[in-house]
Image (cartoon, rainbow, N blue to C red):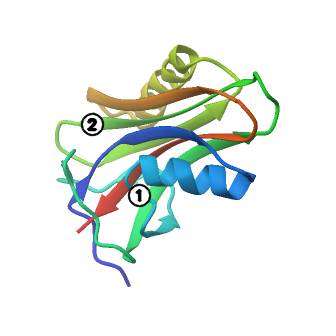
Amino acid sequence: MLPTPKKYFVTAAASEGRSKLTAFDNALLKARIGNVNLIRVSSILPPGTENDPELVLPPGSLVPTAYGYIMSDEPGELISAAVGVGISADTFGVIMEFSGKCSKAEAEKNIENMVKEAFETRGMELIDIKIAAVEHRVEKIGCALAAVPLWY
């Protein structure tokens, strides 16, 4: 069993590659999470977890991460990804992920609405939202990625 994470950061990046997989890998590298092993998790931020934008993850680590991404091989297509972390005053938080064929602004608005809905559904008070988003105009093969890595 993994310990409960104590730190996180929000990140978003986009990149091109010679294949969809390398476009994804290049976006991970730009997002500072390309040299770790992501364990995809759903969307709850543990109570008391602190945002650490300068967090450096040890290479090869197993890192619980909530993320969304989109890849495209349609030149000229606009793709975006966003994550949002909703913060409560005294309990856990909620993470939402989004990706789509839209602008960064649209992705950010979708994330904001999703976080607000998640808090409303849970009957929790939302005191802050942290959002990371990116858009990318595809040249050949592109990827837009947004993530919330969690650490110990």
Mark 2 — residue? 87
For the N terminus, which image quadrant?
Answer: bottom left
Against 80, is 21 above or below? below
* Residue type, label 1: Ile
Q: Indicate which label's residue lies in the foreground, 1 or 2.
A: 1
Q: Nearer the viewer, residue 119 or 82?
A: 82
Q: Position of residue 74 (x, y in %)?
A: 82, 31
Q: Residue most toward the bottom?
A: 1
Mark 1 — residue? 33
Q: Going 23% across and 47% down the picture, which residue do you hit?
A: 91
As helix, strand or loop, the secondary structure at mark 1 comes to loop
Q: Which quadrant of the view contains residue 71? A: top right
Q: Going 66% across and 20% down the picture, which residue do you hit?
A: 102
* Residue type, label 2: Ile
Q: Position of residue 110 (x, y in %)?
A: 55, 22
Crowd band around label 2 with a 10 angstrom C-alpha radius: few (<14), some (14–19), many (20+):
many
